[in-house]
Image: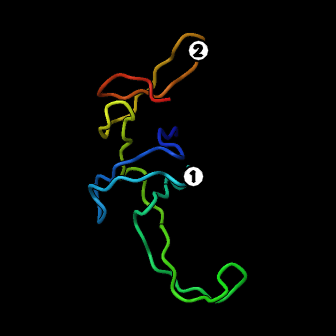
Amino acid sequence: MSIGIRKEDTVHVITGKYRGKTGRVLAVDKGKENILVEKINIIKKHMKPNKTYTQGGIIEKEAPIAISNVMLVCPKCSKPTKIGVTVLEGGKKHRTCKKCKEVID
């Protein structure tokens, strides 16, 4: 299955607790169809002291969110949009905005 959202894209959350918020994609897990979005779906995790967290305690971090719960924000028209695929000259596939018909990348 081809996923149209990539790392460093800007996405808009369309359902759930963080509905209406926008953030930057930090990581994409294609196998589980999850993504990590900056400052979205924050959880608190209890950590033991270790090399990275010398003090330990409660830390806040992003949890994965289902890829079906977000829409890509078009960099040209700045609106959440569906992603289309067009084949340009030379046979290369490119993502396109379904609203303004512009090539995204």
In this picture, residue 30 sits left or right of residue 15: right
Q: How is the image coloured?
A: rainbow
* Picture layout, residue 16 above or below residue 90: below
* Residue closer to the observer: 55 or 105: 55
* Picture layout, residue 53 above or below residue 39: below
Q: Position of residue 31 (x, y in %)?
A: 57, 52
Q: Which mark is residue 91?
A: 2
Residue sitting at x 51%, y 25%: 94
Residue sitting at x 58%, y 85%: 47
Are the two marked residues, 2 and 1, in contact with CB atoms closer than 8 angstroms?
no
Q: How many marks?
A: 2
| Residue sitting at the far top | 89
Mark 2 element type: loop
- Compute the Cα span from label 2 to label 1: 27 Å
* Residue closer to the observer: 7 or 53: 53
Q: Position of residue 105 (x, y in %)?
A: 50, 29
Q: Position of residue 11 (x, y in %)?
A: 39, 47
Q: Which residue is mark 1?
A: 31
Instruction: Using a 10 Å C-alpha cutoff, classify the residue at mark 2 as few (fewer than 14 neighbours), some (14 to 19) or many (20 or more).
Output: few
Mark 1 element type: loop
Residue sitting at x 40%, y 28%: 84
* Three-letter amino acid code at the position of disc 1: Gly
Q: Position of residue 7 (x, y in %)?
A: 54, 46
Report the mark closest to the observer, 2 or 1.
2
* Picture layout, residue 90 above or below residue 34: above
* Three-letter amino acid code at the position of disc 2: Gly
Residue sitting at x 51%, y 80%: 59
Instruction: Using a 10 Å C-alpha cutoff, classify the residue at mark 1 as few (fewer than 14 neighbours), some (14 to 19) or many (20 or more).
Output: few
